[in-house]
Amino acid sequence: MSSAETWPIFTAKLKSREEIAERTMAFHFEKPVGWAFKAGQFIDMTLLNPSQTDPEGNKRGFSIASAPQEETLMVATRLRDTAFKRVLKDMPLETAVKIEGPFGNLTLHNNAKRTAVLLSGGIGITPFRSILFRAAKEKLPHRIFLFYSNRRPEDAPFLAELQALQKENSNYKLVATMNEMDKSHQPWHGETGLDR
């Protein structure tokens, strides 16, 4: 994008938050009327007047985890010990942040005859959640395979949703694998280990 071009900049209020895996949270922000994005894109988020800051600053890029049809703008993150993540985790509902974007072109291709294969691990699932929920909602004809690797089920953001989505979209297949089940407290009947 050239310096002469601009992209949307707006403030959005935090509406809710939820834990989606161990040390991983999803944050739901209000979506302005008329603002649109493509499934798979990302935004930049800036905290406004945060209670604390550190050398990493008050701005981060986040893939959009929600599908375009969903009511809120959802992002998700692992909760590392940074000032940004601490403020985001603890800020009161209705707190506003600055959003810039959308950016990026990690989107589902237009050739429905060509199978889409998505590879993800851990929190890298966020843009693919957006793509998969859009495909299901719009009943896209694309065959989509998601290969999703995590250490344990406890570490897998959106795992239950992604499993359930297979019932809604028969063109979608999830292949999830866990590679540290000896450290898990949950049952797992799917793939395990690392393929080499």
Image: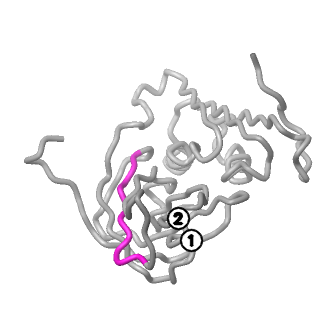
What is the three-letter code of the residue carrying label 1?
Answer: Lys
* Label 2 Cα neighbours within 10 Å, binned few <14 / some 14-19 / many ≥20: some
Residue 95 position within the rendered picture, expressed as x and y whole percent measured from the top left: 43, 81
Give the labeled residue for mark 1.
89
The one nearer the camera, 111 or 27, is 27
Q: Is residue 47 magenta?
A: yes
Magenta stretch bounds: 41-50
From what the image shows, is residue 127 above or below residue 119? below
> What's the residue at 60%, 47% (across, down)?
123
| Residue projecting furthest to the front | 55
The one nearer the camera, 43 or 61, is 61
Is label 1 in a helix, a strand or a loop? helix
Give the labeled residue for mark 2.
85
**Image quadrant for the C terminus?**
top right
> What's the residue at 49%, 67% (across, down)?
83
**Image quadrant for the N terminus?**
top left
The one nearer the camera, 84 or 24, is 84
In the rendered structure, are the residues bearing label 2 and label 1 in contact, judged by CB atoms less than 8 Å apart?
A: yes
